[in-house]
Image: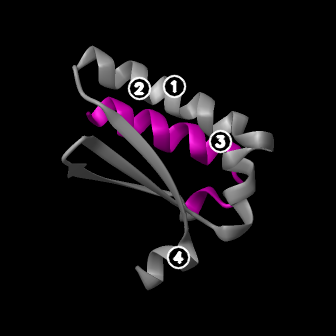
Amino acid sequence: MEKAIALLQYLVQALVDHPEVVSVTSGVQENGLVLKVTVDPRDAGMVIGKKGYVIRAIRQLVNVIGSRERERVMVDIIPIEAAQTA
């Protein structure tokens, strides 16, 4: 799954104004792999996009990699303030 993590980090860093803050962590849940992307709160809107089109496209790309490895992959966007309180 390193390919999925690397692709996700590359795509998100290319979209945001504060790429140094972006981090991707992975975890396993009962229904698949979860990739959590931590971003600056000011950049969350850029990653989500208008009507969610950007994050939907990112999720589709990551799912292509996951399907090649027969793994379900979910992507969550977490603004850094929410990540610190969790």
In the rendered structure, which disc, 3 or 1, sits on the residue that comes first in sequence? Answer: 3
Mark 2 residue element: helix
Magenta includes 24? no
Separation of marks 3 and 1 at Cα, in angstroms: 17 Å
Separation of marks 1 and 2 at Cα, in angstroms: 5 Å
Q: Taking 4 as reference, is 24 above or below it?
A: below
Residue 70 place in picture, x, y as percent: 22, 20
The residue where tag 3 is placed is 14
Dot in front, 3 or 1: 1
Mark 4 residue element: helix
In the rendered structure, which disc, 4 or 2, sits on the residue that comes first in sequence? Answer: 2
Residue sitting at the far top: 68
In the rendered structure, which disc, 4 or 3, sits on the residue that comes first in sequence? Answer: 3
Amino acid beneath label 4: Ala
Circle 2 packing at 10 Å, graded few (<14), some (14-19), many (20+), is some
Residue nearer the viewer, 37 or 75: 75
The residue where tag 2 is placed is 63
Residue sitting at the far front: 31
- The tag on residue 60 is 1
Mark 3 residue element: helix
Tag 1 and tag 2, C-beta contact below 8 Å: yes
The residue where tag 4 is placed is 82
The stretch in magenta equals 1-20
Separation of marks 2 and 3 at Cα, in angstroms: 19 Å
Residue nearer the viewer, 75 or 3: 75
